[in-house]
Amino acid sequence: MKNDKNNLPKLLTKKELHETASKRINLITTELKNMFAFLEKYPKSVTIFGGTHFSENNPYCIQARSLAFNIVKKLDYAVLTGGGPGIMEAANRGAFEAGGNSLGLEIELEPIQEPNKYLTESIYFHYFFTRKIALAFSAEAYVFFPGGFGTLDEFFEIITLVQTKKIEKIPVILFGSDYWNSLEQFMRDELIGRGVLTGDDINLFKITDNEDEVIEIMRDTPIHNGIEFNHRDLKKHGIEIQ
């Protein structure tokens, strides 16, 4: 079957390529500036990840809601999520019901993902990677509930950043041993077994089913100064945060 030349996409000229790239760079810069300004208002926070497809009566959602409630009540931390349904909504609901800062870092998706109704403040992103920077930036701990590709993507990115010392070593907690134990076993059998990970790498995260243990881990973790460090780093690249 011959290609119909009339249906082939039009190639951009060098000028059009430059203009398109400039627009994207400007949008990326704007999203980063807005993101840092947003996060700077909440110097103590925990980021909670998890799947979107769980209903509010699912045990994982019940646990996420309870954990977020107690993080606010006992530690006075802001709770950050992706702002969507499922585990995110449950965590935001717990923080909201505790009277705390319940934050959403939302993304433009097709089909449209409606923000959950328990957000006290939120910010929108066009690009996934700028949103991922926000979710992985400046938290005192990262808590992962069971989820799909997005949750696993965030988990592996964050432990890679910790492993390579691109971010400080802070708690990475996997909540729900019935879900996470098989992944840890795969790492031990296949990754350590083949020499692509070491035993120390497995210690970059903690699997638990105990809400009180999460609270105590966070309580024992010092507040870090990610905002101040990254302000200096951004200035090197000409990005000023007002």
Image: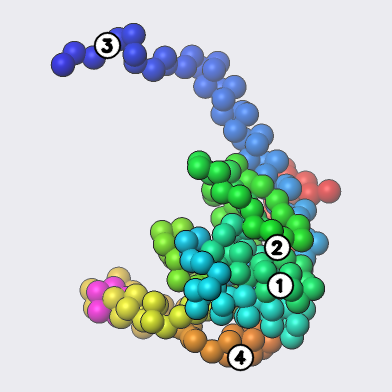
Specify which label sits upstream in the sequence, 2 or 3: 3
**How far apart in space, not on screen, are marks 2 and 1 (Cα)?**
8 Å
Q: Nearer the viewer, mark 2 or mark 3?
A: 2
The residue under label 1 is: 95
Regarding residue 18, the answer to whether it shows in the image is: yes
Residue 165's disc number: none
How far across and down, in percent of the image, does residue 11 sit? 42, 16
165 left or right of 22 in image: left
Would you say residue 16 sits in the magenta stretch? no
- Asked whether the beta carbons under mark 2 and mark 1 sit within 8 Å of each other, the answer is yes
Residue 118's disc number: 2
Look at 42% across and 62% down and name the residue there.
Answer: 148
**How far apart in space, not on screen, are marks 4 and 1 (Cα)?**
16 Å
How far across and down, in percent of the image, does residue 27 sit? 65, 36
Specify which label sits upstream in the sequence, 2 or 4: 2
Look at 58% across and 90% down and name the residue there.
Answer: 213
- Asked whether the beta carbons under mark 2 and mark 3 sit within 8 Å of each other, the answer is no
Specify which label sits upstream in the sequence, 3 or 1: 3
The residue under label 4 is: 212
Question: Could you tell me the amino acid type at mark 2?
Answer: Tyr
For label 3, the SS is: loop
Start-end of magenta stretch: 187-191
For label 1, the SS is: helix
Question: Could you tell me the amino acid type at mark 1?
Answer: Ala
